[in-house]
Structure formats: C-alpha cells, structure tokens
Image (spheres, rainbow, N blue to C red):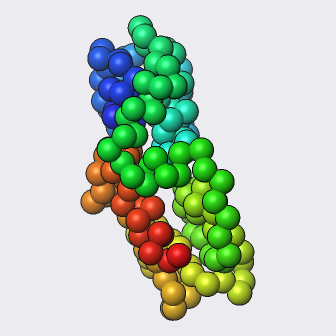
Amino acid sequence: MCEEIVKLAGISDYIVNKHPDEEKGDLAILLSESKVEMNSFAIKINTPSQVFESIKKVSKIGQNELSDEDIIAFFDDYELCRKYLNSNFKRDVDVKVYSNFLKDIVLDMGFNIVLRDFDYVIYPDYLKNKVTESENLVEIPSHNGISKNPFEKIEIRYSLLENLI
C-alpha cells in the first residue's frame, strides 16, 4: 500500500515485499501500524493531510525532495482529497467508530466520535462480524477489494461518509 507514495516521492529503486524482514534492504517504508525489525520508516495514508505528509516525508529520503506545490499537484484530479486537505470541518453528526484508521478519517471530516447516543456506526469491512449494533451502519472498505492508490482509496471512503451529511 505504500508503493504509490514511494513512486510519487520519486524513488525508483525499491522492492515491494509483504514481509520486509525476510528481504535484504536499507530501509522499510511501511504503514504506521506495521512493525518490523529492520530499519523502517512509518507513514499514514488514511486522510489527505496524512498522504501529503507521507509524500513529503518519503521524498526527503529520495534524490529530489518535493516542494509543497509539487505534492499539492498530485491532488488535482481528486475532488474530495482536495476538499479535505488542510480543512477544518465541523459537523453536528455523532458517530461510533470501530478501528483507529476510521477515527482518523471521521475526525478529519468533522464528525464527533461518541460511544453512545450516536447517529451512525462506522466500521471497517473486516470487523463486520464484531459490530453489535443493527441500525444506521456504514461499512467502509479497508484493504482488500479497494484501490491501492491512496487518493482513490480516500475518494471512495470519504464519498461513503459524505452521504451521511
């Protein structure tokens, strides 16, 4: 999932491996939830600002560090990514959230996270069987069956949540 960030950051000499510790390499670039024993660089790509910061951070280790303007240009074709990049939305919608990556997203979109008296329950597809509520459910695709492109992934996830507004 980090490969698109690596490409955008201008790094061309890399190997994609689900198990970095089983491969020789100088540095593993991985999602912040992942843990490896080798030297690693953790990134987050759940929200537009996280994608922006991850591209910026990864480009610093490459040959040519990208400017903010260079990175913002990557967002041009993605309406919701542009809308929520550096935004401060506040909504009067209370949600219960299953999973940390979804907390990043709903906070970025301005929803209020609560444990009771919520308007909607938002959960990732892989926790479908753990959800105990039965009404106002919003299932969000996690990793399987969704684009590896972080911009497309944000567009899909945010569009599902925008429908709640």
Looking at the image, residue 95 lies above or below residue 64: below
Spot the residue most to the bottom. Answer: 134
Looking at the image, residue 58 lies above or below residue 103: above
Observer able to see residue 40: no
Q: Residue at x 55, y 42 (%)?
A: 49
Q: Position of residue 122 (x, y in %)?
A: 53, 73
Q: Position of residue 38 (x, y in %)?
A: 51, 22
Q: Residue at x 35, y 23 (%)?
A: 23
Q: Position of residue 140 (x, y in %)?
A: 42, 68
Quadrant in which the N terminus appears: top left
How many numbered marks, from 0 up? 0
Position of 74 with respect to 87 (left or right) is left
Q: Residue at x 36, y 27 (%)?
A: 8
State the residue in front, 94 or 83. Answer: 83
Looking at the image, residue 116 lies above or below residue 4: below
Q: Position of residue 64 (x, y in %)?
A: 42, 10
Observer able to see residue 6: yes
Looking at the image, residue 22 lies above or below residue 152: above
State the residue in front, 21 or 13. Answer: 13
Position of 138 with respect to 111 (left or right) is left
Q: Residue at x 55, y 33 (%)?
A: 53
